[in-house]
Image (cartoon, grey):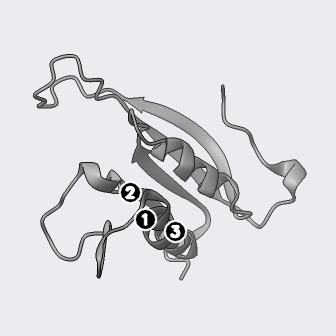
Amino acid sequence: VNKFGCIFSSPPYYTLEDCKVGKQSIFKDDGLKSYDEWIETYVEPTVKNCVNYLINGGYLAINMKNTLCLSMYDDIYKILSENDELVFVCEERLKNIRRPSSKKKLNTDEKIMVFQKMEPKKPSQRSKRPE
């Protein structure tokens, strides 16, 4: 615990990515997890693990985007911003200019949200995401 100064994660996009290696985060014994189950059993524990391993003052950066059907970026942002040990630092746009896609006008831009681990804060000290 408290070993890393920076953690970067690009989690799978629920059912949109299949890494083909090991047990996938979207499956349970009797089939596919719902999106809410995936958030609860994969995303939330992953975030908790990352925060536990960050040193105070360390940074957690997550690459994610909303899709047409799911608000993954917004949902992960909400989980991070509700953590009393994290403070929102910035949001950067990652422009994927040459990403292979069968859809010519598919928006492949993604965002990276950056949070910093601090001592637990009071609700009045929470920073807000830019609109």
Comes first in the chain, label 1 or label 2:
2
- Looking at the picture, does residue 14 appear above or below residue 110? below
The residue that appears at 82% across and 61% down in the rendered structure is 121
Q: Is residue 48 left or right of residue 6?
A: right
Residue 118 drawn at (x, y percent): 70, 62
Q: Mark 3 points at which residue?
A: 40
Under circle 2, the secondary element is strand
Q: Is mark 1 on a helix, strand or loop?
A: helix
Question: How far apart are labels 3 and 2 at the CA level?
Answer: 17 Å
Residue assigned mark 1: 38
Q: Residues within 10 Å of mark 2 (few under 14, many from 20)?
A: some
Q: Nearer the viewer, mark 1 or mark 2?
A: 1
Name the amino acid type tagged 2. Ser
Residue toward you, 63 or 41: 41
Residue at numbered disc 2: 9
Q: Considering the image in quadrants, where does the C terminus appear?
A: top right
Residue visible at 44% across and 42% down in the picture = 70
Q: In this view, does 23 lie to the left or right of 119?
A: left
Label tally: 3
Density class for disc 3 (Cα within 10 Å; few <14, some 14-19, many ≥20) is few
Amino acid carrying label 1: it is Trp
Which quarter of the picture shows residue 122?
bottom right
Asked whether disc 1 touches disc 3, contact meaning CB atoms under 8 Å apart, the reply is: yes
Q: Is mark 3 on a helix, strand or loop?
A: helix
In the image shown, does 12 or 114 lie closer to the viewer?
12
